[in-house]
Image (cartoon, rainbow, N blue to C red):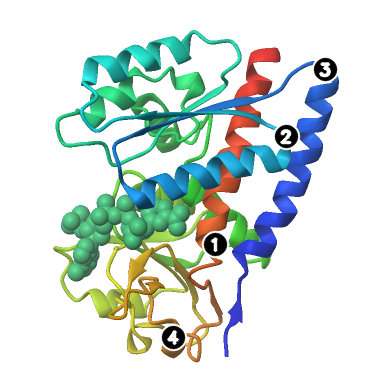
């Protein structure tokens, strides 16, 4: 039976140290500020935004939530970002994705001042991650590296397989594992013999968006299995990309959904907001 890595517990520990860091900054008259922009009426997005706001309150950061209607134009959104870029009270700006189809996501991300891009999605920050010179680490992959560290798992020399190549999870995850000296393979929808490749892995990160995609027969005994997925099972219940019940009997370590990677993502966002505020004062 695998060790279950609790993102909730690791996250609570990191948030406590962030709370202390925020208190020290407050003594210097600095309150890190995060602005979150939500466009449209997506229930899941609204839930994520509320959790980010709650996370800020919990550790003593200032936050603003800008809720805009679906029919907001790209120009209006860019105008708000320009104002937040110029606002000295705001250290981090996050635009909740996805955006309505009439808005160009790339143009919006590019408009965020890279120094305030706490999601690390701006092409300048993505480039810096590739070069190993990151200003901010992207939240979900950074949270996963913290989860590995919390169990003393060093990726160096290990075979890591990342399933998924999105710009926000798969690609930066592969880069962080590579920088930690793992031998990394990225799988995607055109990968041939995917189960064979996954079976080689000492560390598997599943970021596919398909419920229970990783089955027990795909996992090497003792492997570390990290589940990024936030999917719905046949009964509409939240589940991950990994068949948790079966894989936990084969893996050495596994993250649950919920309570695994999810809580870490917001914690890393809070950490990036503090990093951004520090950069302004140093
Ligand atoms: P995405 O942009 O949809 O990317 C999914 C990736 O999976 C793509 O690279 C796709 O390949 C690959 N894929 C899809 N079907 C596949 C198949 N049958 N075989 C192999 N590869 C396949 O998704 P994402 O934004 O990376 O998110 C992935 C999952 O993580 C989602 O469930 C999302 O909700 C969740 N998520 C969770 C958090 C968190 O904080 N816990 C944060 C972000 C995302 P192609 O590139 O070839 O299409």
> Toward the viewer: 146 or 67?
67
> Which picture quadrant has residue 269?
top right
Whole-percent x, y for residue 56 in the image? 63, 38
- The residue tagged 1 is 155
Q: Residue 247 bears which disc, if any?
A: 4
| Residues at marks 1 and 4, CA–CA distance in whole angstroms | 20 Å
Residues at circles 3 and 1 in contact by the CB criterion of under 8 Å = no
Q: Residue at x 46, y 15 (%)?
A: 84
Labels in figure, total? 4
SS category of the residue bearing label 1: loop
Q: Residue at x 39, y 17 (%)?
A: 81
SS category of the residue bearing label 3: loop
232 sits to left or right of 35: left
| Residues at marks 4 and 2, CA–CA distance in whole angstroms | 39 Å
- The residue tagged 3 is 28
- The residue tagged 2 is 60
> Which picture quadrant has residue 38?
top left
> Toward the viewer: 250 or 240?
240
Whole-percent x, y for residue 261 in the image? 51, 60
Rendered-image quadrant of the N terminus: bottom right
Depth check, mark 3 against mark 1: the one in front is 3
Q: Residues within 10 Å of mark 1 (few under 14, many from 20)?
A: many
Rendered-image quadrant of the C terminus: top right
Instruction: Specify which label sits upstream in the sequence, 1 or 4.
Output: 1
Residues at circles 4 and 2 in contact by the CB criterion of under 8 Å = no
């Amino acid at each position: 039976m695998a060790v279950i890595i609790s993102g909730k517990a690791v996250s609570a520990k990191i948030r406590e140290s962030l709370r202390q860091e925020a208190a020290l900054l407050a003594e210097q008259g600095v309150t890190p500020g995060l602005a979150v922009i939500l466009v449209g009426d997506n229930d899941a997005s609204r839930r994520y935004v509320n959790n980010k706001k709650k996370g800020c309150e919990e550790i003593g950061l200032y936050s603003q939530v800008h809720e805009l209607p679906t029919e907001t134009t790209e120009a209006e959104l860019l105008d708000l970002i320009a104002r937040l870029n110029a606002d000295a009270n705001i250290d981090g700006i996050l635009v909740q994705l996805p955006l309505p189809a009439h808005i160009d996501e790339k143009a919006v991300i590019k408009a965020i001042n890279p120094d305030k891009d706490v999601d690390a999605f701006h092409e300048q920050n993505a480039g810096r991650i590739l070069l190993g010179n990151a200003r901010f680490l992207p939240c979900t992959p950074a949270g996963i590296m913290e989860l590995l560290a919390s169990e003393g798992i060093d990726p160096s020399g290990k075979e890591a397989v990342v399933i998924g190549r999105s710009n926000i999870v798969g690609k930066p995850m592969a880069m962080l594992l590579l920088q930690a000296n793992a031998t990394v393979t990225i799988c995607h929808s055109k990968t041939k013999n995917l189960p064979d490749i996954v079976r080689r892995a000492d560390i598997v990160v599943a970021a596919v968006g398909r419920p229970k995609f990783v089955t027990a027969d795909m996992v090497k005994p003792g492997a570390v299995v990290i589940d990024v997925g936030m999917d719905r099972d046949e009964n509409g219940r939240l589940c991950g990309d990994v068949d948790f019940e079966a894989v936990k009997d084969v893996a050495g370590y596994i993250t649950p959904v919920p309570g695994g990677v999810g809580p870490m993502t917001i914690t890393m966002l809070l950490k990036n907001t503090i990093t951004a505020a520090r950069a302004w004062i140093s």
